[in-house]
Image (cartoon, grey):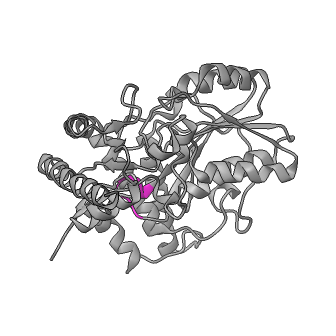
Amino acid sequence: MFTPVYLDWNATAPLDPAVREAMLPWLGSRFGNASSRHEYGRQARAAIDEARAKVAAAVGAHATEVIFTSGGTEANNLFVKGAAGLTKPGLIAISAIEHPCVREPARQLRRADWTVREIAVDRTGLVKSSDWQAVLAAKPALVSVMLANNETGVLQDVATLAREAREAGAWFHTDAVQALGKIGVDFRALGVSAMTLSAHKVGGPLGAGALVVDKRLELAPLLAGGGQERGLRSGTENVAAIVGFGLACELAAARVSEENARLSALRDRLEAGLAGHGMRIFSAGVPRLPNTVFFAAQGLDGETLVARLDRAGFACASGSACSSANPEPSHTLLAMGVEREIARGAVRVSLGRDTRENDVLDFLACLSRQIAELNNLTAVAVQ
């Protein structure tokens, strides 16, 4: 059976076998509702409590600060809309490279008399200092800046940004979905008011995530009902997914140092090969995730190249998986000032726990063949 090489780990990671085994009982004989008072319910509640403690430990938080959600999108919406729901309308500032599940709910706040300001980034993808200072001078009520960008892998200095935002009187949130399991993530050390996590990026199941919330930050719930998750996320808990999320976080935290070093070496090998082919590697000179490479070839369409690579047995991406329905170039690259034609040629390769050196070498060889064929087709077309 044909099995392509998977190089799209930022989109999702395959379910870790150990996580699958931990979830299976909760998809069969252990079926209780965690709100029930009998033994079945108590077992489910204990499993959720254990998972909550594991998620908290993985990010240096307290278990009472972890609110389970259906994923990163809901968690980001819970911060943006939940914080705004109990705050006098004012200014919400988000970075210009935020994921759509931060950007779109922020824009929806305009209907509730909020002002939305995008914080500019420089050509490397880092928050532009001059614009950040201008935002602080405008006294924002809410700020959201992602810890690691899902396309370029760029790491923001969130600890400094959060401290300065706090000094200016703002609540500061960071989307840490892409960072968890790839670098060390410490809620307390970052000094943020809230932080978003997602299970399926670290080998957990789809459909589980969390918002880690400082107890001083009050949120209006998105879902009202039976009062689960401290009243912030009503609804019968998905015990199997939550159990899987907890173990995935525990495993990711235990592996992060070793995996960081291994993936950094693979990324460097990949980038050396790409440079040899004349590729432009975005954000190469600033701190990035160890597994992420975003590059472009002059004159080539990224979607076309990704499709050809897929047929040849290599699964990668032309940008964010959540934006794949949008034919426009990467909004991250455009915010960085990259020319539209170059941005259209962008391809993202993201590595993970199953990626090996031969996968990288085989990918480079295949990429070389595909580029040569596309260039030959272009040459024939213009004759």
On the rendered structure, is 356 left or right of 91? left
State the residue in front, 360 or 168.
360
Residue shown at the point (30%, 39%) measured from the top left: 279
Q: Residue 215: percent from the left, percent from the top?
A: 66, 39
Q: Is 156 above or below relative to 354?
A: above
On the rendered structure, is 308 left or right of 89? left
Q: Is 77 above or below relative to 206?
A: above
Q: In the rendered structure, does residue 359 fall within the stretch colored magenta?
A: no
On the rendered structure, is 259 left or right of 329? left
Q: Residue 26: percent from the left, percent from the top?
A: 40, 73
| Range shown magenta | 199-205
Q: In the rendered structure, does residue 201 fall within the stretch colored magenta?
A: yes
Q: Residue 198: percent from the left, percent from the top?
A: 47, 53
Name which quarter of the figure residue 33 lies in. Answer: bottom right
* Residue 219 visible in the shown view: no
Q: Give the quarter of the figure containing the C terminus.
A: bottom left
Residue shown at the point (49%, 65%) measured from the top left: 207
Q: Residue 245: percent from the left, percent from the top?
A: 42, 57
Residue shown at the point (65%, 60%) measured from the top left: 233
State the residue in front, 250 or 95.
95
Name which quarter of the figure residue 221 lies in. Answer: bottom right
Name which quarter of the figure residue 134 lies in. Answer: top right
Residue at the far left in the pictured view: 358
Q: Is 341 above or below relative to 284?
A: below
